[in-house]
Amino acid sequence: MCVCVCLCLFYLFQEAATFAKELGFETDDIAVIAHKTQNLPKENAKRQRLVVFTQGKDDTVATVEHKRSVGDAESSH
């Protein structure tokens, strides 16, 4: 999968785990996967990539630039 042109990625946590395995990230920590995905090379180095991994009833993980956010899924209802 080429993510070199993607600036915004949304995945379910199961997809994130598969993505990480395919890229050899060697972790199943969703926050670490989000951070590593956000830092993958991209064509436009001037624009930051946003990565969001949803986890159903569990916290949603998002990264942009060098910031990571973990949100409470219940607070959005």
Image (cartoon, rainbow, N blue to C red):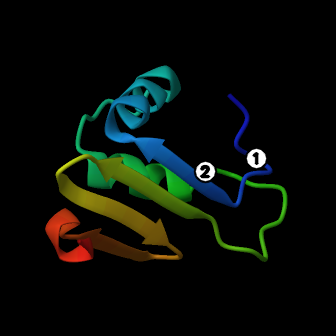
Q: Measured along the vertical axis of the image, is residue 31 above or below residue 18?
A: below
User: Which residue is located at x 83 percent, y 65 percent?
Assistant: 44
Left or right of 32? Residue 48 is right
User: Which residue is located at x 44 percent, y 67 percent?
Assistant: 63
Question: How dense is the environment of label 2, judged by Cα within 10 Å: few (below 14), some, or many (20 and up)?
Answer: few
Of 66 and 15, which appears nearest the observer? 15
Tag 2 residue? 40
Tag 1 residue? 4
Q: Measured along the vertical axis of the image, is residue 16 above or below residue 69?
A: above
Label 2 residue SS: loop
Question: How dense is the environment of label 1, judged by Cα within 10 Å: few (below 14), some, or many (20 and up)?
Answer: few
Residue 33 coordinates in the image, percent (x, y): 37, 46
Which amino acid, by three-letter code, is at mark 1?
Answer: Cys
Residue 22 coordinates in the image, percent (x, y): 49, 21
Q: Most extreme residue toward the right, as rendered?
A: 43
Labelled disc at residue 46: none
| Real-space Cα separation, disc 1 to disc 2, in angstroms | 7 Å
User: Which residue is located at x 27 percent, y 35 percent?
Assistant: 27
User: Which residue is located at x 32 percent, y 61 percent?
Assistant: 61
Which amino acid, by three-letter code, is at mark 2?
Answer: Leu
Of 27 and 71, which appears nearest the observer? 71
For the residues bearing labels 1 and 2, Cβ distance under 8 angstroms:
yes
Left or right of 5? Residue 9 is left
Question: Counting residues from the N terminus, which is met first, the one under dot 1 or under dot 2?
Answer: 1
Q: Measured along the vertical axis of the image, is residue 75 above or below residue 59?
A: below
